[in-house]
């Protein structure tokens, strides 16, 4: 069995690995570290949760242990799609480089440019950044990329989903042609394949799992759900989520709940908290400091339920997540793989449950086609009677109010001798006591003096009974 000592890493790095409690590398680490240390380009393809971060941080620290950074010219560059993933990579560098004198800077949104500029001006060995913030610093003239020796692109398929590919291509063009490139992705879409063919030179390809596979140690299930009424679907779906969480009992130590929309993240989080569950939201519209506090609470166990958009689907390194709930079926099949990859990490058992409404069945079929397996259907826990229609989203999950019993209907009396006026075919009421409609009257040209007058009876003025000719003569 391969150990970290067999990978020719710096002794100071090995010491940090041992202190962190790791002994044997994962397959992606064992495959990617040796060629990276040899200076080769690396193309790593592995599902999330397999240890890709250490696959590039460990060889980078070993290679950068010698040398010195210059002002505004970082020696290495790590590009990440989200702030959370970039912050996690920075934490990994702190863990593995604590016995090596290397400087780093983290360039992400939500932090002032002034603080980041101060770090860059001193010179950094490792620059970890999201593409947008990196280009902001470059365009302000505060950063040069001509000294980059090693460039890492992490979660490249997520970069593609978020529309960062043009930025990635531009950043590649700003770095030296002689740089070493370490490129990691969970899947290989055609666009990703094109970029690797363009910017990587004879890369060592390490693929440790079939593309878009789900972990075998994750128990999966889907609940097929249909609301009683369209306007009640949201509140009933949230009630189902709460029932699913409660049904897991003590087996659920913590969980991530994924929603497709940011607004739903907030609503679901409020719903869970209203019913006494320990939950907090995280999505791109929240302040960066709040997002970091929420993640820290989830990592240290003070927060049990994390309600997230896909901003948290990648790179959340919390090894002991017991459950993942997909409140919504993801629109892109690949996102399902990354979402449920938050559980069952590092060889642990995990469980992933998804709620599917009728209009999401096509997306469910796409997921099953991608992972090449049918996700087992599971029964929903017993549901209470549907609540009344909520007035606002904040009141969506308020407990149902008791509904008063309907009044007993009074028995109908016998038909009257003189029934109420009936309606004719046009909806007009006839004023005939006998129930005859206007259509039964004689034509306008008839005198009608010898006929029974219909309508006003004895109370009709005499002139109305005159014929046209008689009126004219008078």
Image (spheres, grey):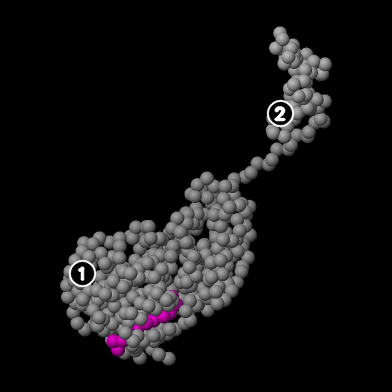
Direction top: furthest residue: 474
Q: Position of residue 213 (x, y in %)?
A: 50, 77
- Identify the element where label 2 is drawn: loop
Is 227 in front, or is 471? Answer: 471
Spatial separation of the CA atoms under disc 1 and disc 2: 86 Å
Quick check: 67 left or right of 160? left
Q: Compared to 182, does 116 lie above or below?
A: above
Position of 241 relative to 473 (above/below): below
Q: Is residue 145 above or below residue 116?
A: below
The stretch in magenta equals: 38-48
Q: Residue 184 or 65: which is nearer the viewer?
A: 184
Q: Measuring 52% from the left and 79% from the top, which residue is drawn there?
A: 216
Find out whether residue 46 is within the magenta segment.
yes
**Is residue 53 highlighted in magenta?**
no
- Report the predominant secondary structure element of the magenta stretch: loop
The percent position of residue 424, horizontal first and vertical second, equals: 73, 32
Tell me the number on the disc at residue 143. 1
Q: Position of residue 325 (x, y in %)?
A: 51, 65
The residue located at (33%, 73%) in the rendering is 89
Q: Is residue 91 visible?
A: no
**Circle 2 is placed at which residue position?**
429
Crowding around mark 2 (Cα neighbors within 10 Å: few <14, some 14 to 19, many 20+) is some
Residue visible at 43% across and 73% down? 319
Within-10-Å neighbours for mark 1: few <14, some 14–19, many 20+? many
Residue at 38%, 89% (x, y): give it.
3
């Amino acid at each position: 069995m391969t150990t970290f000592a067999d990978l020719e890493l710096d002794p100071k790095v090995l010491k940090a690995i041992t202190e962190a409690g790791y002994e044997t590398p994962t397959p992606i680490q064992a495959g990617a570290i040796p060629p990276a240390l040899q200076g080769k380009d690396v193309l790593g393809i592995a599902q999330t949760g397999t240890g890709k971060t250490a696959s590039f941080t460990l060889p980078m620290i070993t290679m950068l242990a010698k040398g010195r950074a210059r002002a505004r010219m970082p020696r290495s560059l790590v590009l990440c799609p989200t702030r959370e993933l970039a912050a996690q990579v920075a934490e990994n560098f702190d863990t593995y480089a604590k016995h090596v004198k290397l400087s780093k800077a983290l360039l992400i949104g939500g932090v002032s440019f002034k603080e980041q500029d101060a770090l860059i001006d001193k010179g950094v060995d490792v620059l970890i950044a999201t593409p947008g913030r990196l280009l902001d610093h470059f365009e302000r003239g505060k950063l040069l990329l001509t000294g980059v020796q090693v460039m890492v692109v992490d979660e490249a398929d997520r970069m593609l989903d978020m529309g960062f590919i043009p930025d990635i291509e531009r950043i590649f063009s700003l770095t030296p042609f002689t740089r070493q490139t370490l490129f990691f992705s969970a899947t290989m879409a055609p666009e990703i394949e094109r970029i690797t063919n363009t910017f990587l030179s004879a890369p060592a390809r390490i693929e440790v799992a079939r593309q878009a596979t789900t972990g075998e140690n994750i128990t999966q299930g889907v609940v097929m759900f249909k609301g009683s009424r369209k306007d009640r679907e949201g509140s009933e779906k949230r009630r189902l989520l709460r029932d699913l969480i409660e049904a897991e009992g003590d087996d659920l130590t913590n969980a991530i709940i994924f929603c497709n929309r940011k607004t739903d993240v907030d609503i679901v989080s409020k719903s869970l908290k209203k019913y006494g569950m320990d939950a907090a939201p995280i999505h791109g519209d929240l302040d960066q400091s709040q997002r970091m506090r929420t993640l820290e609470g989830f990592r240290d166990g003070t927060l049990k339920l994390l309600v997230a958009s896909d901003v948290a689907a990648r790179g959340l390194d919390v090894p002991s997540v017991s459950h993942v709930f997909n409140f919504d079926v993801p629109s892109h099949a690949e996102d399902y793989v990354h979402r449920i990859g938050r559980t069952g990490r590092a060889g642990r058992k995990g469980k992933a449950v998804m709620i599917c409404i009728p209009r999401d069945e096509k997306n469910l079929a796409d997921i099953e086609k991608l992972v090449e397996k049918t996700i087992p259907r599971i029964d929903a826990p017993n549901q209470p009677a549907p609540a009344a229609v909520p007035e606002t989203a904040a009141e969506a999950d308020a407990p149902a109010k008791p509904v008063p019993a309907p009044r007993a209907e009074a028995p109908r009396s016998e038909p009257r001798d003189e029934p109420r006026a009936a309606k004719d075919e046009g909806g007009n009421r006839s004023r005939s006591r006998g129930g005859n409609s206007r259509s039964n009257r004689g034509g306008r040209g008839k005198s009608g003096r010898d006929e029974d007058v219909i309508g006003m009876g004895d109370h009709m003025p005499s002139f109305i009974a005159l014929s046209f000719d008689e009126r004219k003569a008078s």
